[in-house]
Image: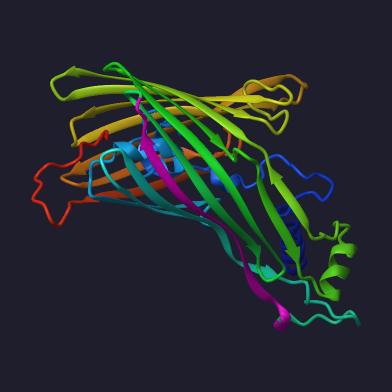
């Protein structure tokens, strides 16, 4: 078991950092692609066109111009891989005036209490279990958002400046900086369109490592590459979306949205696999009654799985969710599977959003559940 701990510790460290020979690896800073808000996760992250609350600071900063509250605050906690990994989100957004808004988003994805057994065996081959320590591997994202309505009716533009900090205990750390850009456009009464360019100018992560001699010996003994200081590059990603929403009868409504993720880092194992651009579609639908309740479903994460007979079959990830609202408070739940049918890694996700009224004004109105 102790030997297994050593191997897992080393594998985690080496898998966290990028390949030294590949400046722009696939899945760089991928923790920023998980998503925030259980309402979005319940729709398989198909919200780029229609998002209009505090979570727009993450999904599409242009959507911040739709916030009607004096201040909105959102929070989410999720656990993945049977509770091994923790994922947390906090967002704040506030209109500046009638045409502009600003927001801040904080995201953390981390694994705590990882056994560090690199010092378990000394140079003489003696085992000392007292030398086993633990460390944390964490990824942190800080997004500063600004959005403004354009002179063209129904159009808004927005952008993010993001700071990324990643670390593996005291052994490795990196700082990164990048920009996102977003646009929203309302067409008539029923349609919304949106687009986002994540890492628009490419995002650079500068990695530095602090490994002692015994840790280097452990890497060599386990045939792992010794990491070197360097840069990791995250290439741009385009997300396009279209939403249709209409009332069925009285306050009953239905809305659906489809998004297309266009990755520019080469051939990925998604529905449409091409080089250099791979296209990953996902779709969601929501049925609701006014501001009170909404049920959601979505399909995404299409993956090609190779069978034992060398043929391929297509799998996808189904998500479901529900939301309830009362006055300015909204509670959402999503049930997701972050793997395919053979893995079945199910997670329960809860998120909370509430709006604050301007203390200088008396405002009895409250945001609807689908806002």
Eyeballing the image, is 243 above or below 13? above
Q: Nearer the viewer, residue 97 or 285?
A: 97
Work out which residue is located at the far front of the displayed protein and give it: 151
Q: Quadrant of the C terminus?
A: top left
Eyeballing the image, is 306 above or below 202? above
Residue visible at 20% across and 40% down in the picture: 367
Give the side of residue 128 with respect to residue 180, left or right.
Answer: right
Q: Nearer the viewer, residue 65 or 314?
A: 65
Q: Magenta segment, which residues? A: 130-151
Q: Nearer the viewer, residue 137 or 61?
A: 61
Location of residue 22 by image quarter: top right
Residue visible at 30% across and 38% down in the picture: 99
- x and y percent of residue 38 in the render? 38, 42
Asked if residue 135 can be seen in this view, the reply is yes
Is residue 68 part of the magenta span, yes or no?
Answer: no
Query: How would you classify the magenta stretch by its main secondary structure?
Result: strand
Give the side of residue 75 with respect to residue 288, left or right.
Answer: right
- x and y percent of residue 247 in the render? 21, 19
Give the image's coloring scheme: rainbow
Give the side of residue 133 with respect to residue 94, left or right.
Answer: right
Eyeballing the image, is 171 above or below 83? below
- x and y percent of residue 273 in the render? 69, 22
Is residue 137 part of the magenta span, yes or no?
Answer: yes
């Amino acid at each position: 078991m102790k030997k297994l701990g050593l191997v897992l510790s080393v594998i985690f460290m080496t898998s966290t950092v990028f390949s030294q020979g590949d400046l722009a690896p696939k899945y760089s800073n991928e923790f920023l692609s998980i998503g925030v808000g259980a309402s979005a996760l319940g729709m398989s992250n198909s919200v780029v066109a229609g998002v209009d609350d505090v979570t727009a600071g993450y999904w599409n900063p242009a959507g911040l111009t739709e916030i009607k509250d004096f201040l909105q605050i959102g929070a989410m906690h999720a656990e993945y891989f049977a509770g091994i990994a923790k994922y947390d989100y906090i967002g704040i957004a506030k209109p500046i005036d009638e045409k502009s808004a600003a927001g801040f988003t904080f995201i953390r994805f981390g694994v705590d209490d990882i056994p560090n057994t690199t010092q378990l065996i000394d140079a003489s081959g003696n085992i000392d279990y007292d030398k086993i320590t633990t460390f944390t591997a964490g990824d942190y994202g800080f997004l500063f958002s600004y959005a403004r309505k354009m002179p063209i009716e129904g159009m808004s533009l927005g952008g993010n400046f993001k700071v990324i900090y990643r670390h593996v205990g005291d052994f490795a750390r990196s700082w990164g900086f990048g920009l996102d850009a977003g646009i929203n456009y309302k067409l008539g009464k029923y349609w919304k369109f949106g687009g986002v360019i994540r890492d628009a100018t490419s995002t650079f992560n500068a990695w530095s490592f602090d490994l002692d001699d015994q840790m280097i010996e452990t890497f060599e003994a386990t045939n792992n590459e010794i990491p070197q200081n360097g840069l990791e590059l995250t290439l741009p990603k385009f997300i396009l979306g279209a939403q249709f929403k209409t009332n069925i009868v009285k306050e009953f409504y239905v809305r659906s949205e489809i998004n297309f993720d266009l990755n520019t880092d080469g051939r990925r194992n998604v529905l449409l696999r091409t080089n250099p651009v791979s296209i990953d579609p996902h779709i969601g639908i929501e049925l609701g009654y006014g501001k009170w309740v909404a049920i959601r479903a979505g399909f995404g994460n299409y993956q090609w799985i190779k069978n034992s007979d060398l043929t391929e079959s297509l799998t996808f990830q189904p998500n479901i969710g529900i939301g309830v609202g009362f006055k300015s408070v909204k509670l959402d739940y999503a049930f997701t599977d972050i793997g395919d049918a053979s893995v079945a890694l199910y997670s329960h996700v809860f998120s909370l959003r509430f709006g604050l009224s301007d203390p200088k004004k008396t405002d009895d109105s409250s945001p609807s559940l689908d806002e």
